[in-house]
Image (tube, rainbow, N blue to C red):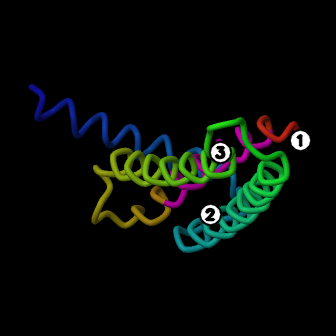
Amino acid sequence: MYRLIYPCIGAFMALTSTVQASNLCPGANTETQMLECMQQSLKKSDRQLNELYQALVARFKAEGSAPGQPTQDLALKKAQRAWIAFRDASCELETYESVGGSGFATIHTHCLLKQTQARVQYLKRVTGMP
């Protein structure tokens, strides 16, 4: 029974990602166009993430640290490394059923994009930015 259920769940997750991706790139008519659009969106989100991260590192360095504690910028760096590992593992799991398929690159890129956009929103809350 599980042999039937797991592939169905994987196919559903892949289909859901593809539908969400098509909403982000309404002008994309082919898989190649969809992938290019997703990659551009990911680059933009990654730049935004890096800008927020650098702003936080600078702010935390300027604020110093609590007595006997490591500086907050070091805690941020540790958290960011852990988030990257989580993002990669999470997307590996989420896209596992589509590995080897024609839409894998788009589905995987969409997963990375969703994770990155969520991290951007989190860091905006931490920085107090809108």
Label the magenta part by its dominant secondary structure: helix
Q: Earlier along the polypeptide chain: callout 3 or callout 2? A: 2
Q: Which mark is residue 129?
A: 1
Q: Report how far apart the C-alphas of labels 3 and 2 lie in the structure.
A: 17 Å
Q: Which residue is mark 3?
A: 119
Of all residues shown, which one is farthest toward the front?
68
The residue that appears at 40% across and 40% down in the rendered structure is: 13
Tell me if residue 115 is in the magenta stretch: yes
Q: Residue 49 at x, y = what percent?
A: 71, 56
Please give the residue where the numbered disc 2 appears in the rendered image.
Answer: 38
Could you tell me which quadrant the N terminus lies in?
Answer: top left
Camera-side residue of 8 and 88? 88
**Position above or below: 58 against 30:** above
Local packing at callout 3 (Cα closer than 10 Å; few below 14, some 14-19, many 20+) is many
> In the rendered structure, are the residues bearing label 3 and label 2 in contact, judged by CB atoms less than 8 Å apart?
no
Q: Name the side, left or right, on which 83 lies relative to 26.
A: left
Identify the amino acid type marked 3.
Answer: Arg
Dividing the picture into quarters, in which one does residue 104 lie? bottom left
Residue at (47, 56) in percent of width and height: 107
Give the image location of residue 2, x and y in percent. 12, 28
Q: Amino acid at mark 1?
A: Met
Foreground residue among 43 and 71: 71
Percent position (x, y) of residue 87?
A: 48, 49
* Magenta region, residue range: 109-124
Element type where label 2 sits in the image: helix
Task: Using the image as rendered, state which of residue 81 and residue 58 is in the foreground.
Answer: 58
User: What secondary structure is marked by label 3?
Assistant: helix
- Rounded to the nearest whole Å, what is the CA distance between mark 1 and mark 2? 25 Å
Identified at 57% across, 51% down, the residue is 80
Left/right placement of residue 125 relative to residue 40 reads right
Residue that sits furthest to the right in the current view: 130
